[in-house]
Amino acid sequence: MTMASLLLGAGAAVAAPVAAQAAPVSQAPAAQAAYSWQYTGEYFSAKSACDARAPYYLKASNVKKYRCVSEGGLWAGQVYAS
């Protein structure tokens, strides 16, 4: 009977040691989202009504700014967002 079979027969566990390895750390800079002016799809007959929608859009985490632009007699909402 070999020594290994004696150890296994006796209930001893034989395992190779496992070295702990740290997870690699990324050195790349975080990717930044590209922001651009985008139409909200809403049009208003008065600039004041357009301006009143600003708080709604500015709550979104990807919206930096809100503005109203004149479009053929109406006011269009735009957001500066990613």
Image (cartoon, grey):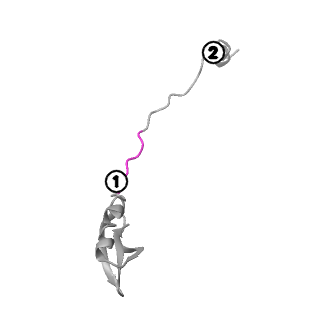
In this rendering, is residue 71 above or below 38? below
- Main SS of the magenta part reads loop
If you read the primary sequence from the N terminus, does the residue marked by circle 2 or circle 1 appear first? 2
Which quadrant does the N terminus fall into? Answer: top right
Q: Residue 59 vs residue 17: left or right?
A: left
Looking at the rendered image, the disc whose residue lies closer to the viewer, 2 or 1, is 1
Q: Which mark is residue 27?
A: 1
Mark 1 residue element: loop
Residue labelled with disc 2: 7
Q: Residue furthest top?
A: 10
Q: Nearer the viewer, residue 11 or 44?
A: 44
- The question of residue 36 being in magenta is answered with no
Q: Which residues are magenta?
A: 22-28
**Can you tell which quarter of the image residue 46 is in?**
bottom left
Q: Residue at x 35, y 86 (%)?
A: 73
Q: Residue 14 vs residue 58: left or right?
A: right
Q: Residue at x 34, y 70 (%)?
A: 79
